[in-house]
Amino acid sequence: MEDESVTGLSTEKTSSNNSLQLGNLNISNMPICYIDEAGFLENGGALIGYNVFQNKILEIDFDNKLLLIHNELPRKNNTYSQIEFKQTTGGLYVPITISNGKKVSKGWYFFDTGADNALSFDSRFAKKENLYNTMKVIGKAGIASSENRVIDAEILEVPEVTIASYKLENVPTLLANESNAESAFEDGVIGIGLQSRFNFIIDYPNSKMYLKPSKYFNDSFKKKIK
């Protein structure tokens, strides 16, 4: 099969008719793709696609470091805030509002559990919203592109980020000088650095997400979640 990642297009080996077990969830006839990307998974292992949970309710409990797979929406969802998300063939996107102190911008951000940063802007979104040179630069970074090269990026300090009704301040955010793929992740990406500030219940069949602050909500972004 053809696999597309930030390192470009490649032809990879696949295997069919496999069985997958996650807790009490058993899936048969599961296709598996072998991707030889040295260093991508430091200690080996596998990446599990969101489509495995497509007909389930997925609960991500950062407080207790648990991934819970439900057949029905748990009753405790009434203690969470609710938002609707968008689904594509590549995953799900959540609505996020940011403020640079002078302007408020709303966008759809790819919910990427494999990204260890907090937030990133797509360059086209940043240009459209006139975000360049409007926020404090706190660092530099390099982002791998789909053309096997590194794109220069700045790490900005975004004064305010709002998800549902929850506001976080001074969020470190990557902003590249150019888009890193033709099929960019809409307006940006929300990674584990920000996701871990919440506990989530993701209702895939109904495209609804429930969230509430986790015990990490008020932690400094300089502190890594372990």
Image (cartoon, rainbow, N blue to C red):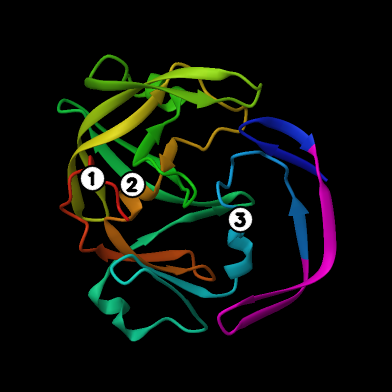
Relative to 137, say whether 106 is above or below.
Answer: below
Q: Is residue 110 above or below residue 56?
A: above
Q: Residue at x 61, y 60 (%)?
A: 48
Residue 191 left/right relative to 27: left
**Residue at 66% over, 21% down:** 147
Q: Position of residue 68 (x, y in %)?
A: 45, 76
Disc 3 to disc 1, C-alpha distance: 25 Å
Give the quarter of the image for residue 196: bottom left
Q: Which residues are magenta?
A: 11-30
Question: Farthest residue toward the front?
Answer: 43
Q: Tag 3, which secondary structure?
A: loop
Between the residue at mark 3 and the residue at mark 2, the CA separation in whole angstroms equals 19 Å
Q: Residue 105 location, x and y as percent? A: 29, 34
Q: Is residue 129 magenta?
A: no
Q: Which residue is mark 1?
A: 223
Image depth: mark 1 or mark 2 in front: 1
Looking at the rendered image, the quarter that the C terminus falls into is: bottom left
* Main secondary structure found in the magenta portion: strand
Which labelled disc corresponds to residue 184?
none
Q: Is residue 192 above or below residue 214?
A: above
Q: Identify the amino acid type marked 2.
A: Gly
Q: Picture quarter containing residue 21?
A: bottom right
Q: Which residue is mark 2?
A: 193
Measure the alpha-carbon separation of dots 1 and 2: 9 Å
The spot of residue 165 in percent (x, y) is: 21, 55
Q: Which residue is mark 3?
A: 47
Q: What amino acid is at disc 1? A: Lys
Specify whether residue 13 is painted magenta.
yes
Helix, strand or loop for disc 1: loop
